[in-house]
Amino acid sequence: MPAERARSVYLDYAATAPMPPDVLAAYTAALHLVGNPASIHSQGQNSKRMLEEAREKVAASVGADSVEVTFTSGGTESVNLAIKGLFASQKRSVILVSRAEHHATIDSVEWLAEHEGAIIDWIPVDHHGRIDLDYLATAFTEDVALVTLLLANNEVGTIQPVAEVAALAAAFGVPVHVDAVAAYGYLPIDFHALGVAALSISAHKIGGPVGVGALIIARSASVEPMIHGGSQQRARSGTQDAAGATAFGFAAERATAAVAANATRLASLRDRLVAGIRSSVPTATYRGDPDPQGRLPGNAHFTFAGCEGDSLLFLLDTAGFSVSTGSACQAGVPESSHVLLAMGVPESDARGALRMTLGVETTEAEIDALIAALPDAVAKATRAGLATQSSNLGLKP
Ligand SMILES: Cc1ncc(COP(=O)(O)O)c(C=O)c1O
């Protein structure tokens, strides 16, 4: 294990996952080779063979056919391509989407509203972050262009009713895009059984390289390309990254072969963490679906009232734990999670968010160490929160 990771307990798998040694070996071996997969000579054809083997592995990892795999530069590009490409391929204008989506989705639909005349119909979510199916059932009209939703929420882990959404949409001939980036490698995915038009995945969330992803596009779906050029792939131009795809293929094969066993192991570690936090910090509120079956196995998300999540994060970092607040910083300025706000969590509570995401290397000893370290960090972060409030009010802390 590299020295810099040995110092810290890494509990931020939803941000990115470590690359297993065999994936790294396959990646570096592939990087040594030269050859554009579009070239006719034998080195080019060797790259092409590697690329197509990787495409088959990635396709198999989500129950799709290799012709349905378009490699991209990652989850963000896949989501952009799916939403903008599905929208551009038809004449309808309404997009059904919730406010608890990843920013790749929110910002894509808002861009379409601003520049392409899209009309956004925001689907409400309940206090666990799950979309309101009753609302959705009444929202379909002849002007609905697409529905886009997460397979599982990347912040609070709540699993969405994708099959139900796909069935409702099918009745109106509306294509569905699923952002499966957070669920990939943690839940089994069967693209054909889901019956959706497109599904986004990303390599670095399962131990593949950053900057490599895929959009799975059903044979029957029509997605207008967003990057034009040499038409190397069905929905995307540009020289294909055979080495990145190879590493992605290895990681995909590895992660999905172990998905059931990994999910069982992670769910038990997660339950240990949740029980431990509940007893050591009784004021903590568990967020997302409390039903262990209703959320990602490796996700534990809490809010700590009166604490700033960022203070908590820094204190835990100093104590040797890498965790997350779950929400993005906009230009370095921390902001409350739009997901928690969409779930109806008050802004004051949303500020004290902490997301812990577990993965292949997480151990029981690490979980116990975090449970032991948390009360002190929460006490200090609460004092810091009180001090900030007092100084905002012009009082002495
Ligand atoms: C649900 C979800 N969608 C999309 C993305 C973007 O993926 P990438 O980092 O590969 O661009 C992420 C990354 O955090 C995510 O969690």
Image: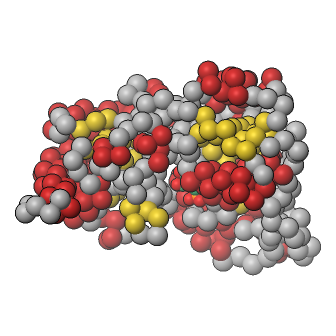
Left or right: 325 in relation to 119: left
Residue 209, how many percent across, how many down? 57, 63
Residue 154, how many percent across, how many down? 49, 46
Report if residue 238 is visible in the image: yes
Give the residue at x 82% y 27%. Answer: 172
In the rendered image, the quadrant that contains the C terminus is bottom left
Give the residue at x 14% y 58%. Answer: 390
Left or right: 261 in relation to 308: right
Report if residue 203 is visible in the image: no
In front of the other: 225 or 138: 138
| Outermost front residue | 394
Give the residue at x 57% y 27%. Answer: 132
Residue 184, how many percent across, how many down? 57, 44
Image-quarter location of ligand 1: bottom right
**Colour scheme employed for the rendering of this structure:** secondary structure
Q: Quadrant of residue 335?
A: bottom left
